[in-house]
Image: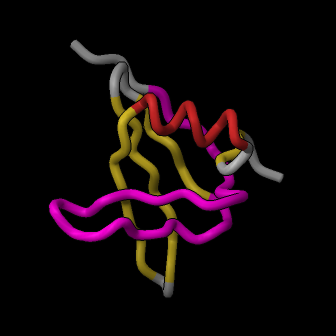
Amino acid sequence: MTSTTQIDARIAGPVEFRAGDGPQLKIPEGNCQVLMADDSVVLTWTEGGQSLTAAIPKIEFDRYIADGAIVLGRG
């Protein structure tokens, strides 16, 4: 069984993800929800009134945190 944790966060810099085999897409700056599992992270945000999600590997998420592009908590 995989454990998950949900956290409020904020996109504060360049954060990108790849949808399938398509190009890299940018997540806009602003508030988001982070659902963390053991080896991956799902980001959820609202853009144009729609709720969007992106899954990224945990190692990429950790890099975004270290770079300050994702800030945990609201603020």
Marks counted in the figure total: 0
Q: Choose between 28 and 45: the one closer to the eye.
A: 28
Q: Say if 43 sits above or below 16 in the image.
A: above
Outermost residue, left side: 21
Outermost residue, right side: 75
Q: Residue at 42% across / 79% down in the picture?
A: 50
Region rendered in magenta = 5-31
- The image quadrant of residue 7 is top right
Residue 27 location (% of width, % of height): 51, 66
Q: Say if 57 sits above or below 30 in the image.
A: above
Residue 47 in magenta?
no
The colour scheme used to paint the residues is secondary structure
Outermost residue, top side: 1
Q: Say if 15 sits above or below 4 in the image.
A: below
Outermost residue, bottom side: 48
Q: Say if 47 sits above or below 63 in the image.
A: below
**Quadrant where the image shows the N terminus:** top left
Q: Residue at 16% across / 62% down in the picture?
A: 21
Q: Choose between 54 and 66: the one closer to the eye.
A: 66
Compared across the picture, whether 1 is left or right of 54 comes to left
Residue 31 location (% of width, % of height): 65, 60
Compared across the picture, whether 5 is left or right of 4 comes to right
Residue 10 in magenta?
yes
Residue 18 location (% of width, % of height): 31, 59
- The image quadrant of residue 38 is top left
Residue 60 location (% of width, % of height): 46, 38
Q: Residue at 50% across / 64% down in the picture?
A: 45
Q: Choose between 3 and 27: the one closer to the eye.
A: 27
Compared across the picture, whether 69 is left or right of 57 comes to right
Q: Main secondary structure of the magenta part?
A: strand
Q: Residue at 67% across / 66% down in the picture?
A: 30
